[in-house]
Image: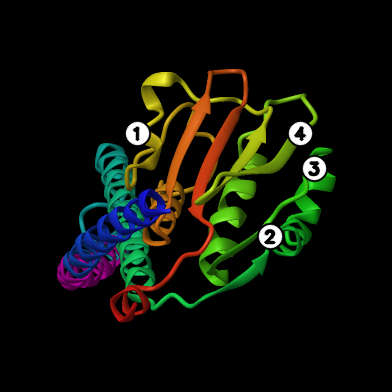
Amino acid sequence: MRRTQNLEQIVSERTSDLQEANEEIQRFAYIVSHDLRSPLVNIMGFTAELEAWRDDALSRIQSLRDSGGGVAGDEEIQEDEGELAGEFTEAIQFIKSSITKMDRLINAVLKLSREGRREFHPETIKMSELLDVVISTVAHQTAETGTTITVRDLPQVNSDRLALDQVFSNLVDNALKYLKDGVPGEIEISAQETPLQIVFEVKDNGRGIDGKDHERIFDLFRRAGQQDRPGEGIGLAHVRTLVRRLGGRMDVKSELGEGSTFIVALPKYWRTRSERSAA
């Protein structure tokens, strides 16, 4: 009994330290992303001005040609004009594309920052019911891809409902996103209990992940493998952050071409920092 209590105390203290570190990171992320938005707005404004100047310059050249102002009939000038207009347009499109991507990344950082500051509220959650809701939201994708999702008997857990919904929604969505071409998808969600934890597994028969990328996929804005699916590389980073805030851990077992198994180990009875302090 004493050994169990000591283990719970160690887990509690480490969870508290980790939460404090995460909160500091979230504050830093908010400040950085907020400061990045200001110059981005300026770049967007100047790009709009460049487009206006381009249109005005081309319009003036066309007016001169129409009025016979010395450029009409000069094929070389017309060719240079067309080439210049094309390069100008291509450059502006490249800038605008980069701005759009940068804006998405900043929004992603802000989203993570806001989520990191949200106060969790532990409650008893019937995981089978929670997964039923998660699966119902992807019914169209499963039908479209011919994917079968099997949910084994899952125990109850004391945790934050919204956080767990985000965790498992992301993992199921990820499994559906990275199916193997031409192979019907199979996703299985199961769990095992230990004295202090419940270890969930989300297993699929998809593309799999190269061993050298097992940690990379949890890094913010880092993605692995063939990049032919939409995404900014924040999903798994966000999920692991949530799991750690819930006092748990997250890992992956996978081989390229052999599917993946994401492991989420959560404490059976998780308490907020204020509850631990009052205990």
Residue of label 2: 127
Residue of label 1: 216
The amino acid sitting under disc 4 is Glu
Q: Which residue is drawn at 80% across and 42% down?
A: 150
Q: Distance between the residues labelled 1 and 4?
A: 24 Å
Main secondary-structure element of the magenta-colored stretch: helix
Q: Earlier in the sequence, mark 4 or mark 2?
A: 2
* Image side of residue 256 versus residue 247, left or right: right
Circle nearer the viewer, 3 or 2: 2
Which type of secondary structure does the marked residue at label 1 adopt?
Answer: helix
Residue 27: % across, % down = 19, 70
Q: Earlier in the sequence, mark 1 or mark 3?
A: 3
Residue of label 4: 186
Circle nearer the viewer, 4 or 3: 3
User: Nearest the camera: 75 or 270?
Assistant: 270
Q: Residues within 10 Å of mark 1 (few under 14, many from 20)?
A: some
Q: Earlier in the sequence, mark 3 or mark 2?
A: 2
Which type of secondary structure does the marked residue at label 4 adopt?
Answer: strand
Q: How far apart are marks 2 and 1 (CA)?
A: 29 Å
Residue of label 3: 150
Circle nearer the viewer, 4 or 2: 2
Q: Which of marks 2 and 1 is nearer the N terminus?
A: 2
Which type of secondary structure does the marked residue at label 3 adopt?
Answer: strand
Residue 133 location, quadrant: bottom right
Q: Earlier in the sequence, mark 1 or mark 4?
A: 4
> Magenta region: which residues?
30-59
Q: Which of marks 4 and 3 is nearer the N terminus?
A: 3
